């Protein structure tokens, strides 16, 4: 099972000069992961519909999911006059349920966690997927991580496989204190390569912002997609991981 996490920067290039969602779609389809956990994806954007000739007629997550990922969930994160963006999970497997959890610390910076539960054909146990995009400030992230830990502790049985992935904005590595110690989850790059993957900025990754944590699965492979065309798409580098279910 292949899992990919990616902050798509609302479908714009790093400089915001070019709308490149069509290029992102092609690149994601070539990877052909089973599940995508995406951040900064538009659910609605009125202004851009008029500014860009190639702006899709449907919502960005529906546009990306087309013909490959028949099941998807979207959770609003940032809401403004011209629309909203948030987190999305695209899946080849059907959802049993999903919910969007508000973890906003400040009124001016709304944030949420998207928790989806999918059923893989032939596998008895349900797979829990949590897509995150945490805040920019230390106290903000600490509050959001505490909510995340409480939610998982109460809503995710310890014997059911779990993946937490997304943009943690955690360049100092403090999330480890919450996720590994409190939830007994591991980060795949830290486990397999000894350090987090550097993912930001995409042109010359210096900071480890994006992560894939897991529990109840066997890690097989992990890869940072930093070559062309990825380094000219979003401002973040996508991460790809492969797991076996026990």
Image (cartoon, rainbow, N blue to C red):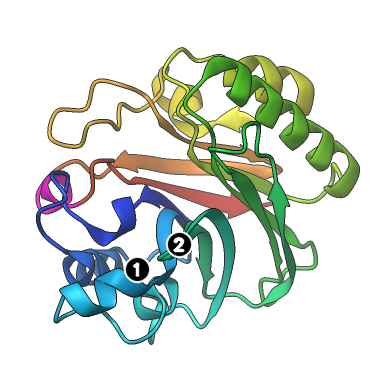
Q: What range is drawn magenta here?
A: 228-233
In front: 230, or 162? 230
Name the spot of residue 107 as percent of width and height, x first: 62, 38
Residue hosting label 1: 32
Across and down, in percent, residue 100 comes to 69, 57
Residue 18: x and y, percent?
A: 11, 59
Instruction: Label 1, secondary structure: give it.
Output: loop
Decide: marks 2, 1 in contact (CB < 8 A)? no
Q: Is 102 drawn above or below residue 97 in the view shown? A: above
Q: Residue at x 59, y 25 (%)?
A: 141
Residue 178 placement, left or right of 206: right
Give yes or no for residue 230 being in the magenta stretch: yes
Q: Residues within 10 Å of mark 1 (few under 14, many from 20)?
A: some
At a point 39% along the width and 23% down the height, the residue shown is 193
Number of disc labels: 2
Residue position marked by numbered label 2 in the rendering: 81
Q: Secondary structure at mark 2?
A: loop
**Residue 60 badge:** none
Residue 154 location in percent, x, y? 90, 42
Picture quadrant of residue 31: bottom left
Q: Identify the residue at image location x=79%, y=41%.
A: 152
Residue 243 in sight here:
yes
Whether residue 184 appears in this view of the structure is: no
In-image side of 232 versus 128 (left or right): left
In the picture provided, is 186 more to the left or to the right than 237?
A: right
The residue lying at 67 percent from left, 31 percent from top is 144
User: Is 56 drawn above or below residue 221 in the view shown?
Assistant: below
Task: Name the mark nearer the viewer: 2 or 1.
Answer: 2
Q: Quadrant of residue 223?
A: top left
* Magenta stretch encompasses residue 157: no
Q: In the depicted view, which residue is nearer to us: 160 or 59?
A: 59
């Amino acid at each position: 099972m292949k899992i990919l996490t990616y902050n798509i920067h609302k479908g714009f290039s790093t400089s915001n000069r070019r709308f490149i969602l069509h290029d992102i779609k092609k690149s994601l389809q070539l990877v052909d992961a089973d599940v995508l956990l995406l951040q900064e994806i538009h659910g609605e954007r009125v202004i851009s519909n008029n500014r860009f000739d190639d702006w899709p007629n449907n919502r960005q997550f529906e546009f990306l999911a087309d013909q490959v990922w028949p099941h998807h969930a979207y959770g609003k994160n940032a809401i403004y006059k011209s629309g909203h963006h948030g987190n999305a999970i695209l899946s080849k497997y059907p959802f049993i349920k999903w919910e969007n959890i508000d973890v906003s610390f400040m009124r001016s910076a709304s944030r949420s966690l998207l928790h989806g539960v999918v059923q893989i054909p032939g596998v008895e146990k349900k797979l829990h997927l949590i897509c995150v995009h945490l805040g920019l400030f230390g106290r903000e992230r600490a509050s959001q991580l505490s909510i995340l830990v409480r939610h998982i502790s109460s809503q995710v049985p310890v014997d059911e496989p779990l993946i937490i992935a997304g943009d943690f904005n955690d360049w100092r590595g403090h999330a480890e204190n919450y996720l590994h110690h409190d939830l007994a989850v591991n980060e795949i790059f830290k486990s397999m390569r000894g350090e987090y993957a550097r993912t930001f900025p995409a042109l010359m990754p210096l900071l480890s912002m994006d992560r894939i944590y897991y529990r109840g699965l066997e890690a097989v492979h992990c890869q940072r997609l930093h070559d062309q065309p990825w380094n000219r798409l979003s401002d973040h580098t996508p991460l790809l991981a492969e797991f076996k279910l026990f």
